[in-house]
Amino acid sequence: MTQKFQKVLCYVIVLMIVFSPSYVFAQTYPNKPIRFVVPSAAGGSTDTIGRMIGQKLAPSLGQTVIVDNRPGAAGIIGTEVIAKSPPDGYSLLLAPGSHAINASLYRRLPFDPLNDFDPVIHVCTLTGVVVVHPTLPVRSVQELITFARVRPGQINFASAGTGTVTHLTGEMFKAMTKIDIVHIPYRGSGPAVIDLVAGQVSLMFTSMSGTIEHVHAGKLRVLGVTSAARSPLLPNVPTVAESGVPGFEASGWFGVLAPAGTHKGIISKLNMEIGRVLTAPEMLERFRSLGATAVGGSPENFGAFIRGQISTWGTSVRASGVRID
């Protein structure tokens, strides 16, 4: 191969890259505002994380990122909006952990949780906690299990509602420890925590956000964390798996999804820019204050994670016996 031919070949390759669809998309996208659908009401942790990302992503992309709250039906309403949006990169979804649960919980969904979306990036995981009212005479997960086994059906646990992460984490705990505790569903985590603090219910499997202040104030007692690793906010509190329930892991999470068919050049650009946002020191601190851990990674890794979550939560849904038409 002559030196002249090598130069011509290099020139041709450069032209192919520059004029390839992926390169063109990456260079011209975005050229108008982006809608970022948050499938929950304003004010909750989902909304907070969505706005955190939107505010930091806008200057990075050079376009306004409009947070569009579409609450209702365990996130299904907002998720359907994105499933039926054009795959042009201008409509994105902040998908919560319920996205994986709904795949098994609902007999019919207006979308396919896997095939109607392209994964962009895994944003974060949320550390869950097992908390009890101080009047319950247990100080560890093992003590809770022992106490419940000799009192079948006498201990109740609150949740944010039937089929939520807080409910199905409790069902997973019941199945893996073979105890009988009674589920009390509420309309959201807020009312459930209020009744737990008041002693109307005894136990809850919930996120650290919204409960950690009650733990520090002595109004609730934390027995363990439901994540795979201990939390830096509660370094002395063991995981449930460490506490004699090997293999137990249940955490909330958030990630970004785009409509299926979105160009790979756009997906790559969004993954890169959101990944940069997630590693900013101020974002890491905000996540930490919410009991969350930034994740990041490739779209492929996030897709594999979602498939694993659908399988995991499907087991808990079947164990609970709950199905919604």
Image (cartoon, helix red, strand yellow):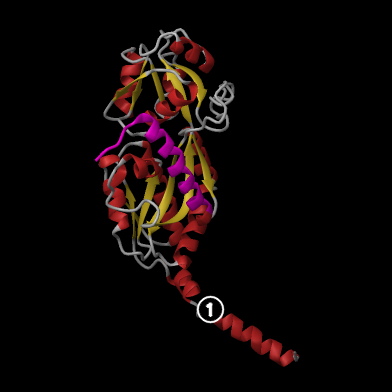
| Disc 1 packing (10 Å; few <14; some 14–19; many ≥20) | few
- Residue 218 image point, x, y percent: 45, 13
Above-or-below relation of 193 to 43: above
Quadrant containing the N terminus in the rendered view: bottom right
Percent x, y of residue 237: 56, 22
Is residue 242 located in the magenta-colored stretch of the structure? no
Q: Residue at x 45, y 12 (%)?
A: 149
Above or below: residue 208 compared with residue 264? above
Query: What amino acid is labelled 1 in the image?
Result: Val
Q: Is residue 252 above or below residue 190?
A: below
> In terms of image quadrants, where is residue 96?
top left
Tell me which residue sits at (37%, 44%) in the image.
Answer: 99
Locate residue 292, reporting x and y percent: 49, 36
- Residue 206 visible to the viewer: no
- Total numbered labels: 1
Q: Residue at x 41, y 26 (%)?
A: 170
Task: Depth check: give the residue in front, 255 or 162.
Answer: 162
Q: Position of residue 226 (x, y in %)?
A: 50, 29
Q: Secondary structure at mark 1?
A: helix
Q: Main secondary structure of the magenta part?
A: helix
Residue 278 seen in the current view: yes
Kindly identify which residue carries mark 1: 18
- Which of the pair 191/181 is nearer the observer? 181
Magenta stretch in the rendered image: 301-325
Horizontally, residue 184 falls left or right of residue 143, namely left
Q: Quadrant of the C terminus?
A: top left
Asked if residue 306 is among those painted magenta in the image, a careful observer would answer yes
